[in-house]
Image (cartoon, rainbow, N blue to C red):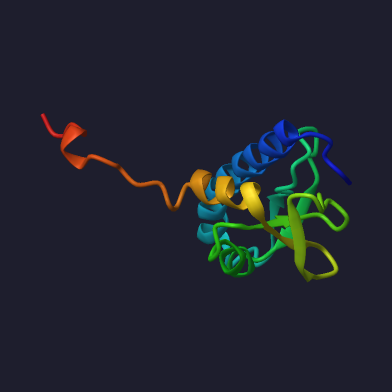
Amino acid sequence: MVLQEESEDIRGAKTQSLYREVNERVKSVHERFSTDLPLGDWLCECADTTCDQRIQMTPGAYEQIRASSIRFVVAPGHVYPNIERVVERTESYWVVEKHGDAGELAAKFDPRSRRVENPSSVRSARP
């Protein structure tokens, strides 16, 4: 799969980051039931905005991938070589790593790496 324009590269990185945010929420549900259901369904985190493919994996495997803000879990073959490279292949999923501008955007949009730039400007939740 090849994205045609730079703007599509950016859109692809944003799409993957959105799927990642959904999977972060899915992860907390899977962790609650991991003793009963060791495998869970995750969304493919590819750059295709129309993709709705599910991937089966354990919460631990997902966490290993998420250790890097530029790595994403995708269904086999859901790769965009102009913005990422495959770093791991399993039977049910592949792991891709972003490079260049897409890698920078992936790190920027990673929900785990978001920081408050000026903590004094954030109001306390307490009354």
Relative to 49, say whether 22 is above or below.
below
Name the side, left or right, on which 118 lies relative to 97. left
Could you tell whether 105 is left or right of 3 in the image? left
Taking depth in this image into account, of 5 and 61 the one nearest to the observer is: 5
From the viewer's side, name the closer residue of 88 and 106: 106
Q: Residue at x 58, y 69 (%)?
A: 64
- Does residue 56 appear left or right of residue 4 in this picture? left
Q: Position of residue 27 (x, y in %)?
A: 55, 54
Quadrant of res 120: top left
- Can residue 125 be seen? no
Of residues 11 and 92, the one nearer the viewer is 11
- Which of the two residues, 104 or 62, is positioned nearer the viewer here? 104
| Quarter of the rendering occupied by the C terminus | top left
Res 56 → quadrant: bottom right
Q: Is residue 47 above or below residue 28?
A: above
Picture coordinates of residue 96, whole percent (x, y): 72, 60
- Residue at 66 percent across and 42 percent down: it is 13
- The residue under the point 18% across, 31% down is 123
Where 77 sits versus 14, above or below?
A: below
For the question of whether residue 29 can be seen, the reply is yes
